[in-house]
Image (tube, rainbow, N blue to C red):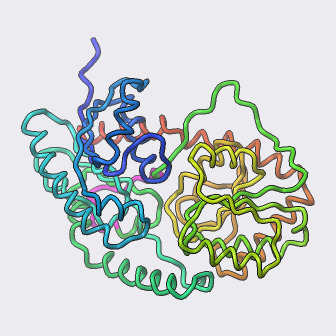
Amino acid sequence: MESKPMHILVSAYACGPNWGSEIGMGWNWVMSISNYCKLTVITELGFKKDIEEVISELDIKFVPDFHYIDIGERGRMLFWKQGSASFYTHYKRWQKKALDLAKELISKEQFDIVHQLNMIGYREPGYLWKLDDIPYVIGPVGGYNQFPISYFSVLDFRNKLFYLTRNIINRIQMIFSSRPKKAYKRADYVILASPTGKENVSRHARTNPIIIPETGAHKLPIDYNIKVTDNEKLVLVWVGFITGRKALPIALKTIAKSKYKDNLILNIVGDGPSANLYKTMAEQLGLDNVNWLGSVTHKEAKKLIEASDMLFFTSVLEATSTVVFEALQANTPVLCHDTCGFGNVIDDSCGIKIPLENVSNSIEMFSEKIDQLIENPEQLKDLKKGCSERIKDYYWDEKGKKTYDIYKKCLE
């Protein structure tokens, strides 16, 4: 006779199908755990339509029960406007409502564990840690990375002011914010998105933090073939929100510096507040091999990644990033800095990473690596073949199983 499944109450503000980034992370994490446990999920009202369109078609063991809280039109707009500090005022109120709803649900049903899943930023841990007499898990938690001072030269004045202020506030919050510390102290287990912040969390947590990247990938089909792109030129793709921390100027100046720049194509997928500034920079550098593709659908972005030889990921401030896993999933190697969560994912089998030292060093080393690939095309083929092996460590099903194992430890 099959034992009764665990029943987990999950708070995941951002959770919906058909999206990448934080929303897709929340959705895929919930789906992966639902193959092992019964979930009741509290999420934001704005995702209700997308969820209800697919929920009857889900191929998972236990279909989650979703409950919705409205953050309001203003809060929802600020959520989509990435990086807005004023969003957290609305988000904090949403989290208080999530605690009230959780208490109501607990009064009606029996739950084995409460899990504060996302959003992953440490500075707003929610309030579910206030629930007594029930095991509590928080994470994956991120947001501990600082913008490196040695890379401030890639920023315009407005972004310099923003990230300098962010660094200062981040440091103050790390030291003085009490709610994250209370959440870690209350938690049976804390999951971290990357090793960054482990020392800070360990000072307050009851158990050693467990590192599980916040995002992942779906299993490849059994008959999936290794892709070897037959491009006449080396095609690089840059994908992301065009803002300071993504450090797009490094990609542009790298292309300009390459001795094989006429054999290169850089496709830029995305838009953002710094787009026009960087387009002007590309013109000043004389780059006519850079294509600005603007915002596209998630599906179109994945096709562009599949058609590329390499993902050029210049970000200097990130968690793990969904697009890195999407590149590996497509057998597209990654060229990046050795930092943040993605620095732990990319190794010599599936990509090339360089030290995060300063802007001029990044441009120099990235251009050298690109030139080496053009001179040694067999290296690129080997990297493409390595992607399909590396991605196996980050399948969503593995993430669900690891989380389920954490739940079992809680009940022990």
Residue 410 is situated, as x and y percent measured from the top left of the image, at 26, 42
Q: Residue at x 17, y 36 (%)?
A: 111
Q: Does the magenta stretch include residue 236?
A: no
- Residue 412: tell me if it is visible: no
Farthest left residue in view: 107
Q: Quadrant of the N terminus?
A: top left
Tell me how many marks there are: 0
In the picture as drawn, the residue positioned furthest to the top comes out as: 1
Task: Report the predominant secondary structure element of the magenta stretch.
Answer: loop
The range drawn in magenta is 201-213
x 30%, y 36%: residue = 408
The answer to which of 221 and 207 lies nearer the viewer is 221
Judging depth in this view, the residue of 92 and 77 nearest the camera is: 77
Q: Where is residue 120 in the image (x, y as percent from the top left)?
A: 37, 58
Asked whether 305 or 115 is in front, the reply is 305
Q: What's the residue at 77%, 82% (across, down)?
A: 284
Residue, x 63% and y 66% (percent of image)?
A: 338
